[in-house]
């Protein structure tokens, strides 16, 4: 009878894993996901980017999942396997990971892990929070601030792009808003080596580069970078009207 109970428990646990919601990685563009994966080289505390939070775990478990407070701990997101490779493309190690869309209106999130059926906090995140109401220990991520944005405060002036380089150059601007045609907008040299251009961009996320001749130059003043779907490295800007 005890053996039968164990078999039933294993069956129910397996069914639970199957029907647990898989991570919505389809929300991430393929080039964005590939760019995020370059940040994962070892199991570590959560990695925070402009749009995503990357959670990691050891790959020696059969199943690892994560639940969040902003979802009332109702949705289990399953971790996936990421293979770390060397310069010769040989697999050196494997890491479990989950990429979560960063909540735009929160400055911190709390979460728990489920590893092979056991609930636990994240052992690689030193920020641990004890909830006295529920009597459980949670892991916590301090996001720090809401998502970085660029706001259009003047519809006439639009969004100002600025490039600082050598005097007397012909600097152009191209991006996802021009279908990567870099010959549409030429920037104005307002003082020696200082080039500006105002564009009335609508609300949204855009990829862009500066161009001198046929050379693409990412924005040195903007730390937000990504690889586009066709493999080019570009600067990223988010506009909120």
Image (tube, rainbow, N blue to C red):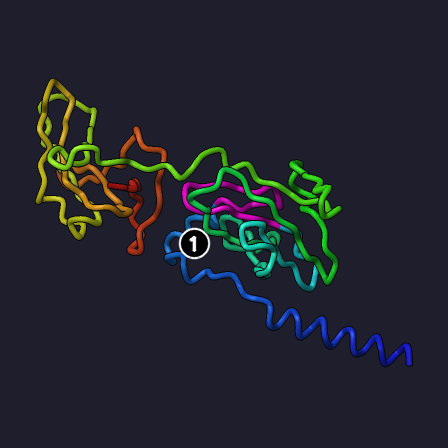
Quarter-of-image position of residue 192: top left
Can you see residue 58?
Answer: yes
Crowd class of label 1 (few under 14; some 14 to 19; many from 20; radius 10 Å) = some
Residue 200 painted magenta: no
- Could you tell whether 45 is left or right of 123 in the image? left
Q: Residue furthest top?
A: 192
Residue depicted at x 40% and y 56%: 28
Can you see residue 212?
Answer: no
Above or below, 144 against 201 in this view is: above
> Where is residue 126 shown, x and y percent of the image?
67, 36
Q: Secondary structure at mark 1?
A: helix
Q: Which residue is mark 1?
A: 33
Residue depicted at x 68% and y 39%: 129
The residue nearer to you, when weighing 91 against 164, is 164
> Where is residue 197 shown, x and y percent of the image?
13, 32
Residue depicted at x 50% and y 52%: 100
Residue 50 painted magenta: yes
- Could you tell whether 156 is left or right of 239 in the image? left
> Where is residue 5 shown, x and y percent of the image?
84, 77
Magenta stretch: helix, strand or loop mostly: loop
The range drawn in magenta is 39-56
> Where is residue 154 shown, x and y percent of the image?
16, 33
Residue depicted at x 66% and y 75%: 15
State which quarter of the image contains the C terminus.
top left
State which quarter of the image contains the N terminus.
bottom right
- Could you tell whether 207 is left or right of 24 in the image? left
Above or below, 84 against 140 in this view is: below
């Amino acid at each position: 009878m005890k053996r039968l109970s164990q078999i039933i428990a294993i069956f129910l646990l397996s069914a639970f894993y199957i029907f647990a919601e898989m991570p919505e990685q389809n929300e991430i563009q393929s080039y964005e996901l590939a760019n995020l994966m370059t940040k994962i080289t070892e199991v570590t505390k959560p990695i925070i980017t402009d749009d995503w939070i990357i959670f990691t775990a050891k790959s020696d478990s059969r199943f690892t999942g994560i639940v969040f407070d902003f979802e009332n701990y109702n949705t289990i997101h399953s971790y996936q396997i990421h293979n770390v490779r060397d310069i010769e493309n040989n697999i050196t190690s494997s890491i479990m990971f989950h990429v979560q869309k960063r909540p735009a209106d929160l400055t911190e999130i709390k979460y728990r892990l489920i590893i092979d059926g056991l609930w636990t906090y994240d052992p690689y995140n030193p920020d641990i929070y004890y909830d006295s109401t529920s009597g459980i220990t949670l892991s916590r991520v301090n996001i720090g601030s809401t998502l970085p944005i660029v706001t259009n405060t003047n519809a006439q002036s639009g969004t100002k792009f600025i490039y600082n380089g050598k005097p007397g150059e012909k600097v152009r601007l191209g991006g996802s808003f021009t279908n990567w045609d870099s010959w549409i907008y030429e920037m104005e040299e307002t003082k020696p080596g200082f080039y500006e251009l105002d564009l009335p961009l609508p609300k949204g996320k855009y990829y862009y580069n500066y161009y001198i001749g046929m050379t693409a130059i990412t924005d040195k003043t903007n730390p937000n970078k990504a690889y586009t779907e066709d493999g080019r490295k570009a600067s990223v800007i988010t506009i909120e009207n």
